[in-house]
Amino acid sequence: MSFASFTLHPDLLRAVDALGFTVPTPIQRDAIPPALTGRDVLACAMTGSGKTAAFILPILERLLAKPRGVTRALVVTPTRELAAQIDEHRRLFARFVRIGGAAVFGGVAMGPQETAFRRGADVLVATPGRLLDHLQYPYARLSDIEVLVLDEADRMLDMGFLPDVRRIVSALPRRPRQTLLFSATLPPTIVTLAREMLHDPVSINVERAAAPATGITHTAWPVPSELKLPLMVELLGQPGVRNVLAFTRTKHRANRLAEGLERHGVAAERIHGNRSQAQRTAALAGFKNGTFQVLVATDVAARGIDITGLSHVLNFDVPHLAEDYIHRVGRTARAEAVGDAFTLVSPDEETDFRMIERAVGTSIPRKRLSGFDYGARAPQRFEVPVAERIAAIRKQKAEERARARQNAERRAAHHRALVR
């Protein structure tokens, strides 16, 4: 089966061919035909399955015959990175047709986004919070929306966006409207949401348990917690390890890991919620162009990073949930390619890791790196405990206040001396 078997406009097929896409992925094969006919779709689609094309191509086909200057399609997605990624895919697929769009997300100025609303961008890709910011104003008109896509719906719910999603949907015309809901997992809240929003949907993979992409080779590296950084540095020097997306449990640990890698001579950057949008964009761009060998991320970015040719995903910290493991490792082996997933497992993480193995239905092989000293003492602690960090901050502030008082007293004494 090829993309030519779909009833797509020749200019869309031309763009598909220019991107090097030949055979549709399973989710594209199953979702594109009903979406082209206007049916609602409920799809369980894993990270890296190629689902963006599964909804963007039918949207573009639908809009080809429509007048420009009216926003007719809205894609709602949980993260800034994913919104930017989807809008970039929209631009690439629409390269030979006159269908415009815009990404609407926080961390950047609202002015250009307001302009996109006012000009009637054909396709808007938005995060819930920033979209609601715009909907407070008269210029943000969504009364002509014909297609609504909820992408990564389970992640939006995990991030607390369900009330925002309901508010957005209430601002849209009810019918006729085509709704496409894509989710990597289908917890009860998603099933309930689908019943509320979708009309007689075509269901795809809804009975399938969540599982990683098939082209991933999984390896666990048991190691004491304090030796994770030295072992990771050694693994980065192994043959075939070209570029690595590494995941940590917290933003603080992401900072510490990036800094630790840099001390060992590894070009690394980090991306997480405390970084500005400019910093996140620069980090991602530097990773894509090869400036950085390692990009350290928290789970907030797990579903928003699309790297062509990513050789390895590395779990510096074992995630607590199997779903998070699946989405992390899905950054490699995208769209039926191949890739490697490394997980550094400390003794106190073994329980969580065994739960992941049970959830994905496979035993992940454990390996030891030849020549690595597993009995060595770490040169320094990787992470300072929270209580110690707070105590250090308080001490620093107390010292700053003491210095300020001393300076004030000296200035007052000097002033009194001048007056005399």
Image (tube, rainbow, N blue to C red):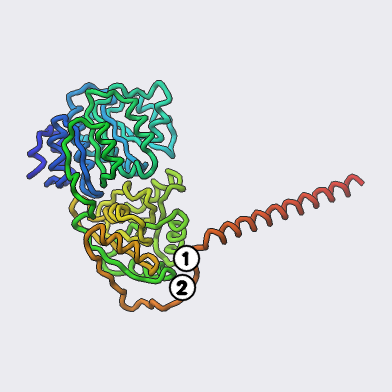
**Is 37 positioned to the left or the right of 195 in the image?**
left
Label number found at residue 323: none
* Residue depicted at x 14% and y 32%: 36
Q: Nearer the viewer, residue 105 or 31?
A: 31
Q: In which quarter of the image is residue 258?
A: bottom left
Q: Is residue 270 above or below residue 265?
A: above
Q: Which of 6 and 132 is in front in this view?
A: 132
Can you say which quadrant of the picture contains the N terminus? Answer: top left
* Residue depicted at x 31% and y 48%: 303
Q: Cα distance, mark 2 to mark 1? A: 8 Å
Q: Is residue 200 above or below residue 252?
A: above
Give the secondary structure at mark 2. loop
Q: Mark 2 points at which residue?
A: 378
Give the secondary structure at mark 1. loop
* Residue depicted at x 10% and y 37%: 6
Q: What residue type is labelled 1?
A: Phe
Task: Tell me the crowding category of disc 1: few under 14, some 14 to 19, or many 20 or more residues within 10 angstroms, Cα based.
Answer: some
Give percent across and percent down for residue 379: 48, 72
* Residue depicted at x 21% and y 38%: 42
- Disc 2 vs disc 1: Cβ atoms closer than 8 Å? yes
Q: Mark 1 points at which residue?
A: 382
**Is 273 positioned to the left or the right of 306 in the image?**
right
Residue 69 in view (yes/no): no
Q: What residue type is labelled 2?
A: Ala
Give percent across and percent down for residue 110: 43, 32
